[in-house]
Image (tube, rainbow, N blue to C red):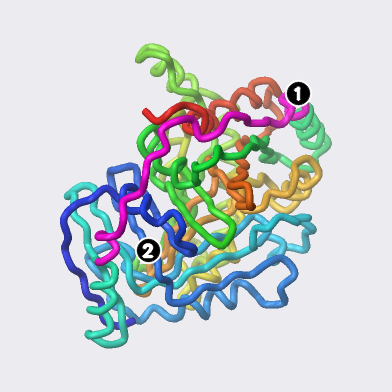
Amino acid sequence: MRHCVTTKLAWRDPIAVLKGWEDLEFSFGLISDGRGWSWLARDCDQVKIIRPGDPADPFQDLADLIGPATAPASALPFTGGVVGLAAYSLAGRIEALDLGDESDWPELIALRVSALLVFDHTRREIWAVGRGETEDGAENRAANAASWLSGPAGREFAGPLTEDIEADDPLAFEEAVARVRGRIAAGEVFQANIARRWRGRLKAGATPLDLAARLSQQSPAPYAAYLRAPGLALVSNSPEQFVQVSPGERTVLTRPIKGTAPRGADATEDEANKAALAASAKDRAENLMIVDLMRNDLSRVCEPGSVATPELFRLETFANVHHLVSTVTGRLKPDVSPADLLRAVFPPGSITGAPKVQAMKVIRELEPPRGPFFGALFWACFDGGFESSVLIRTTAFEEDPAGWSFEARAGGGITADSDPHAERLETEDKIAAILRALTEPQA
């Protein structure tokens, strides 16, 4: 895709545009929290779906779909390439683990797009982008993307999106936390990340995009996303970056999140919660374990001696919680492709534990199969750029003749100092924005 054509268009909110695509399979939106960039696309060039048991090598198929970085970098970030969902179960292709996933979710969904809409929230500009092997081909694709703005407007669902949500037994979760502490005391693991489930059904007429729209308004997140596949939809409100490679560079960056405190009811309580988190030895230790894990993962594909930790325990505030965030960087070896990088670091260390493989075995014993939860959403550009997020604060939907059922999960890293009751309350802080968006009327 050597040619890139961009056309500037009048501003529209990306969620408003996306709402008109409710019935379009293989459509997606990567939605920022209003401080950066968003992307929407449909009409994919190619689709690759790999399910558990398929004989194909998903990483080789992904590498073939992305292809070599031949396109020149654009002034706009992500101007076409591959957008993909790597489910947690994809880890069973990397390590000899029986993850027992019998859900309808594929291990990998990858969509190749050469036409898309790029939204610059800072300047309030939209760019229709087309990529092609010829100038005419690129122009035609950009014109097609521009035409998406003239489609029908989506309707609003005014009431609560659901009436009944069933949560996993909180006491059972506290018992699972206690069991992880026992495994830590026995020297089996240092940390394991386990999660709880919330399940229910949307009301008649409500769709997954209604949840995406409400979260965008009520609890914006830097790595929010929507992905539609046949009979499936995913709405993510993730704050967490996984791995990133800038176009034309060999520097890889990851920013694991570990350590959480709720927002306060007022400014005084909020500042107190931030101070307590920043000073928490337990949360800092939890974060540092995952930093060490990510350093080890990156060392597999980076030049010797290049992996560094330029920032530790940065306190960042989001709509619903405060987090500790650290940064790990490295310089990729010359022959490492985006698919190679994903194979080396997947699944994210922040949602598994340390040591990673043993922690995943513990998770499998204590938690139902994860399906898409705690995997990654990624986008690989024709110009060589790569970005990805961790699928936390995420809701997965499955469609049947009666409508949409859903499941959401929230968890935390369990260490030797974890208090089972406090860990349970932390899951409720993390899931609160999703539950509020599902159960309260449209604001």
For the record, the magenta segment spans: 147-174
> Can residue 318 be seen from the camera position used here?
no
Q: Is residue 99 left or right of residue 223?
A: right
Spot occupied by residue 440 in the image (x, y as percentages of width and height): 47, 26
In the depicted structure, whether residue 105 falls above or below residue 61: above
Q: Which residue is mark 2?
A: 41
Of residue 421 and residue 359, the one placed in the foreground of this image is 421
* Rendered image quadrant of residue 5: bottom left
Residue 39 badge? none
* Rendered image quadrant of residue 117: bottom left
Q: Which residue is mark 1?
A: 171
| Element carrying mark 2 | strand
Spot occupied by residue 386 in the image (x, y as percentages of width and height): 42, 64
Q: Residue furthest bottom?
A: 134
> Can residue 16 be seen from the camera position used here?
yes
How much space separates mark 2 and mark 1, taking CA atoms? Answer: 43 Å
Work out which quarter of the rendered image holds the C terminus and state it: top left
Give me the residue at 47% from left, 32% from top.
Answer: 437
Of residue 79 and residue 398, the one placed in the foreground of this image is 398
Spot occupied by residue 417 in the image (x, y as percentages of width and height): 68, 26
Q: Residue furthest right?
A: 186
Q: Amino acid at mark 1?
A: Leu
In the depicted structure, whether residue 122 falls above or below residue 54: above
Give me the residue at 46% from left, 39% from top.
Answer: 325
Q: Is residue 155 magenta?
A: yes
